[in-house]
Image (spheres, helix red, strand yellow):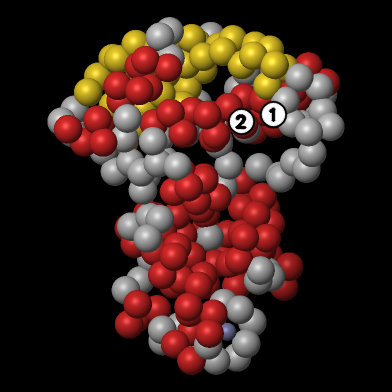
Amino acid sequence: MARWDDYGLDELLANYPKLQLKEESREKLVVEGQFDLINAQMEGFDAITESIHLRIEFPGGYSKEIPKVIDLDGKIPKNPDHHINVGKDDASFCLGSGIKVLDDIAKDTSLCGFLENTVRNYLYRIFYKIKHGVVPGDELPHYEEGLVQDYENIFGINGEENISRLVKALGYRKRVANKLKCPCGCTFRLGKCDFRLLLPEWRSKAPRSWYRNHWEEHFKPALKSKKKHAKTNLS
Ligand SMILES: [Zn+2]
């Protein structure tokens, strides 16, 4: 179980004395307790001070798998407006688009880093919204539309079809992915375009299986419903 020590478990428990270790195994690490936001602030926006009782589950695949964070107080309204995954498992926080969250985690993989960056940013924005009615700065729409916008910004490519191609390519082995149509909008295969040089970095942030599931969950159904929609329009 040295694994969690590698990610700074001791440091987490020392820095957050209100968090208690609930479970520690190869499969997951669970902590629960009070998490304080004290004068959290984003440039140009009001400071927020709040306290919330959280359950945080780090999966065995951390840091290439996203932890689950749950509000044990019921302080955050359970709806997509407040970026809660309603109807999914146990109403965990929707911390952001998957690839963006994994990218943030990759910048600092320590357990403390995840709390300091991803969790703190999410809570600041949500508590700000509860207090002021809007999130500070830009708000991406929840679900697929938000994913596409976010990935367009990250990868500098346009359109749901191209984003879908990109996520699909990341789910395949390099040799197979290179035969797919390039997501950059050129008419070549990925293997013939310099866009392929961007991919290794993203492959290092999550396993192929994660990208495959991400595609199945968010992009495959979108394509299906569009086809269905087109049919309905014809009839
Ligand atoms: Zn291309």
The response on whether ligand 1 sits within 8 Å of label 2 is no
Q: Is residue 33 above or below residue 56?
A: above
Tell me the residue at 35%/77% (across/down): 174
Q: Quadrant of ligand 1?
A: bottom right
In the image, residue 179 lies at what x, y percent? 41, 86
Q: Identity of the amino acid at label 1?
A: Arg
Label 2 Cα crowd, 10 Å radius (few <14 / some 14-19 / many 20+): some
Q: State left or right for residue 228 relative to residue 5.
A: right
Residue 185 visible, this orientation: yes
On the image, numbered disc 2 is attached to which residue?
122
Q: Is residue 20 above or below residue 169?
A: above
Tell me the residue at 21%/36% (across/down): 3
Give the quarter of the image for residue 203. Answer: bottom left
Task: Tell which of 53 and 144 is nearer to you.
Answer: 53
Q: Identity of the amino acid at label 2?
A: Tyr
What separation in Å lies between label 2 and label 1 (alpha carbons)?
A: 5 Å
Q: State left or right for residue 52 relative to residue 9.
A: right
Which quadrant: the N terminus?
A: top left
Q: Is residue 213 above or below residue 61?
A: below
Task: Tell which of 158 and 200 is nearer to you.
Answer: 200
On the image, numbered disc 1 is attached to which residue?
125
Q: Under tag 1, what secondary structure?
A: helix
Q: Is residue 157 above or below residue 35?
A: below
Residue 160 visible, this orientation: no
Give the quarter of the image for residue 77. Answer: top right
In the image, residue 41 lies at what x, y percent? 72, 25
In the image, residue 175 lies at what x, y percent? 32, 82
Q: Under tag 2, what secondary structure?
A: helix
Which mark is on residue 203? none
- How many marks on residues? 2
